[in-house]
Image: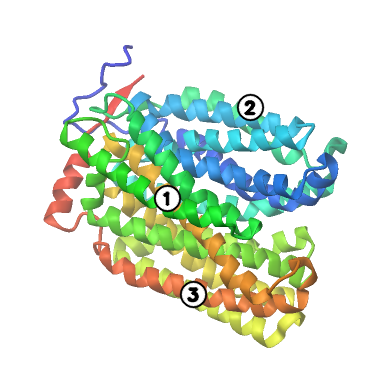
Amino acid sequence: MSENKPLESPMKAAPADPRRWAALVVVLIASFMDAVDVTVVHIAIPDIQADTGASLSQIQWITGGYALSYALGLITGGRLGDLFGRKKVFLLGVAGFTLTSLICGIAGNPEILLAGRIAQGAMAALMVPQVLSIIHVTFPTSERGKVFGIYGAVMALGTLAGPLVGALLVQWNLFELAWRPIFLVNLPLGAAGLVAGWLLIRESKGERAQRLDGIGVALATVGLLLLVLPLTQGRELGWPAWTYGSLTASLPVLALFVAWERRLTRHGGSPLVVLSLFSRRSFAGGQSVQLLFGLASGVFFLAWTLYLQLGLGFSPLKAGLSGMPLSAAMMAGAGLSMQVLVPWHGRRALQGGALLAVAGMLLFAVFATRYGSGITLWQTMVPLVPMGLGMGLIIAPLTDLVLSEVPHEHAGSASGLSATTMQLGQAVGVALSSVIFFGHLGPGDPATQAHAMPEAFTGSLWYVAAAFAAAFALLFALPRRAGTTPADRATKKEAEREPQLVS
């Protein structure tokens, strides 16, 4: 069948794809691989450094290069799916991610490993935005709540599984390969994903997008690089003068990007970011909450990991296992919110999640203050339950709300923008840790300051709680339920128009 022939009239709703649930498994496995790879390297850093002879600067880039190239490419990756086909770009991303995982796994020196990690992040930026857009255009509205609940649970599991998977693979030393299996494990998953994705995912693309906005890509990439690079590397480098100059320079470049996108829209072009999306209350409010959620995550997870391993002396495996209640609670919260609470209570379910997360942080602060370095394993796990439930109640329905009023033709652009907002929030959170967490520790090597860890960690928890409290307030900007205002209902009718589907 011709790739340009739509299966249905654009004004009619398409029949539900009978392969959609099997296709969902494929895209969720890809999401899981990415979520694991973001954090799996941290546990293996000592082994990588000993085996490859990597310098401290190279190690910083091996861990930060992935996140940087990933953040820079998300918006463009999402738009490429709208233009050239989400299935094609997704499979290209999976193939590239698998190949770069092989390069990382067989790297004989730190330079090749660094190049592989940067390329791996770029491939993830092609792959990940297609996941949300494929879900958005494949599943009918009545099923999306359930699907986004599953998606939120899988992402929660992947984020928390990364350190545990890394610890287990390094400890097992499979085939005497030391740290290398943390990358090589992606090979069978990627190969299976390519075959299954080719067979099960139905192609879709935007109806009216004509060409890639090259000037927009360049301006967005440069602007985000100037913003994200100092945020990801500033703390390790001691905040030299160039980091402040880069942050300052990012503002006019990003302002120029917005002006260009507006000009392109006025002249009937195909912008990289559809700025009219921000006129939708659910999208604009959701992006603000995404930013805060990422910020809170960036502050918490860095401080928590250092507190457990350096402050309390937990082994990497023990630290990974101690986080499983958080992952399990996030999964439970995601399912509960999408299946029960959001259909009945709308945005109040998300606000309840924000308050639960605040309660978890305050409980952790009480335990860490009272027991200091003598805190027990179970006392580090109990506060993670309300926090995990709260985060799960927010993140799964928030994704659905953010995309609920987005027309199908802009699904990739909106998905990439949402993921970029989350990544930016996490980068800002990690940067703030230099003031919040490391500021409490004071000068010196964190590995020698175990006595100060409890106080520094407790100080960080207050900021995390404040971020979730701010998210609670910002959630009032969202409609009580998606599609409740007249403008929203009109937009929803537009969003339900069938995208151009090709076999």
Question: Local crowd at mark 3 within 10 Å, few (<14), some, or many (≥20)?
Answer: many
Left or right side of 311 for 284: left
Q: Position of residue 374 (x, y in %)?
A: 77, 81
Q: Position of residue 473 (x, y in %)?
A: 33, 72
Pointer 3 residue: 465
Residue 249: numbered disc = 1
Residue 432: numbered disc = none
Gap in Å between the C-alphas at discs 3 and 2?
A: 40 Å
Among numbered discs 2 and 1, the one appearing first in the sequence: 2
Quadrant housing the N terminus: top left
Left or right side of 316 for 395: left
Question: Local crowd at mark 1 within 10 Å, few (<14), some, or many (≥20)?
Answer: some
Pointer 2 residue: 99
Question: Local crowd at mark 2 within 10 Å, few (<14), some, or many (≥20)?
Answer: many
Nearer the observer, 368 or 66 = 66
Height in image: 15 above or below 337?
Answer: above
Among numbered discs 3 and 2, the one appearing first in the sequence: 2
